[in-house]
Amino acid sequence: MPSCQPAGSLFIDFKTTSCPDLPHFLASVQQYDYGRQAALYLDALRATRFLIIGVQKKDPHQIWVVDATATPGFVEQGRKKYAALLRRHAATP
């Protein structure tokens, strides 16, 4: 069956944040396991690129773009995490 996804498709996930700067936002990306989310969406939607866009809730309302697919190991680690969760769920009676 042909895919409805165009080649090189992009998935963008907007996240509002109270983080004061990019380093804190990057730490929250790790803390909230956005790599797992990125991997699952990439695989489920057959996308090839995943961007996380952080938008500060308060002044100065900065915007940060994190290319999950360009961060070495980020998506691969996320894949391992979501696969482990699926295996654990499948083993639950």
Image (tube, rainbow, N blue to C red):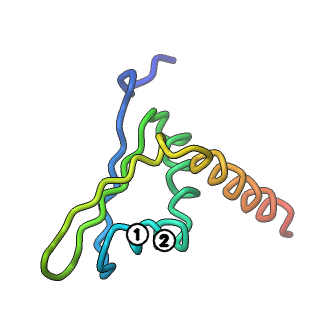
Determine the secondary structure under disc 2: helix
**What x and y, as percent, mark residue 77?**
66, 52
Residue holding disc 1: 23
**What x and y, as percent, mark residue 61?**
15, 73
Q: Nearer the viewer, residue 32 or 3?
A: 32
Residue drawn at 86 percent across, 62 percent down = 91
Q: Nearer the viewer, residue 63 or 82?
A: 63
Tell me the mark number nearer the camera, choosing from 2 and 1: 1
Q: Residues within 10 Å of mark 1 (few under 14, many from 20)?
A: few
Residue drawn at 48 percent across, 41 percent down = 69
Determine the secondary structure under disc 1: helix
Viewport quadrant of the C terminus: bottom right
Taking 90 as reference, is 64 left or right?
A: left
Residue 60 vs 53, above or below: the answer is below
| Label ID, residue 77 | none
Residue 88 vs 43, above or below: the answer is below
| Quadrant of residue 57 within the rendered picture | bottom left
- What amino acid type should be assigned to the residue bearing mark 2? Ala
Residue holding disc 2: 27
- Seen as rendered, the residue at the extreme top is 2
- What amino acid type should be assigned to the residue bearing mark 1? Pro
Residue drawn at 46 percent across, 17 percent down = 2
**What x and y, as percent, mark residue 78?**
62, 54
Report the Cα–Cα distance between label 2 and label 1. 6 Å
**What x and y, as percent, mark residue 4?**
38, 26
